[in-house]
Image (cartoon, rainbow, N blue to C red):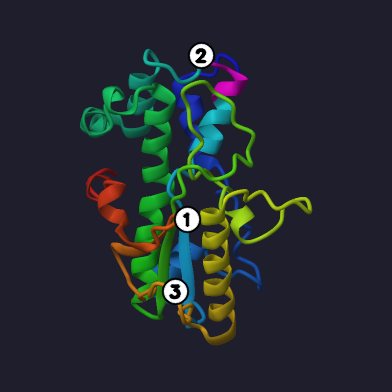
Amino acid sequence: MRGKPAADLVALNRSFSDHLAYGTPVLPLDPATALQRGLFLRVPVISGGNRDEERAFVGGAVMADPTLITDQTYPALLQAAFGASAGRVAAQYPLARYGSAPLAWATVTTDAGWACPTVTADQELARHTTVYPYVFADPHAPNVNGINVPGFSPGAAHASDLPYLFDLGGLDLLKTQPRQDLAASMIAYWTAFARTGDPNHAGAPRWSAGTAHARLQLVPNQIQPADAAAEHRCGLRSTIR
């Protein structure tokens, strides 16, 4: 990866996990096409992700090569990713707001590649079935990805929600009561949903079915609705092609 040009790094990011083997009896259509056409099993769905998904991958890239994502390379990354819209994106994600290029780039790519596509998919799903949207947002979740970059907090990165639902490697990684309480709530939501198709259960904040913006934000001591589309600037993304 060392010395990889900005355009190559962006292309690698775009292709990540986009290798579904559809066109088979098991998965006849591209899932995106199936969602748009409503050609899927009409069952209730829990849909969501982590607020800082891309920090796991950006942090790993910086650990491999600290020259990849810097104040100097940030404009080129935006240009390679967004072309003529790079200036508008830079205005919404200025380096000064984030304190470092890796944090800024992780936020851009989380919003463009994870959060806003999830909002769009939820809207498509909700045209045909019941959707319970969520965002896992514990800013101090266990660092399951082993990211160690000075000044770069992993936050609620990819896979950091897993210790709240499972013991990993036989270990309980949640060492504080608020996180253990959040885990208990998440497990109860998921198991209630598996049992009834509705995650709500006695003693927990209500999780409303929704479509676009309001989703349940999962944070220790703060389980409450949040506007994901606004937080992740999905209005800007919808104007960029």
Residue furthest toward the front?
177
Rendered residue at 60%/50% (across/down)? 19
Circles 2, 1 touching at the beta carbon (< 8 Å): no
Residues in magenta?
62-66
| Residue 207 to residue 51: above or below | below
Q: Position of residue 231 (x, y in %)?
A: 29, 48
Left or right: residue 163 compared with residue 59? right
Of the image marks 3 and 1, the number of the one nearer the N terminus: 1
User: Is the C terminus in the top left, top right, bottom left or bottom right quadrant?
Assistant: top left
What element does badge 1 sit on? strand
Left or right: residue 87 compared with residue 38? left
Checking the image for residue 204, the label placed there is: 3
Distance from the alpha carbon under mark 3 to that under mark 1: 20 Å
Checking the image for residue 67, the label placed there is: 2
Checking the image for residue 146, the label placed there is: none
Circles 2, 3 touching at the beta carbon (< 8 Å): no
Q: Which amino acid does label 1 sit on?
A: Gly
Q: Which amino acid does label 2 sit on?
A: Thr
Q: Is residue 65 magenta?
A: yes
Q: Residues within 10 Å of mark 3 (few under 14, many from 20)?
A: few
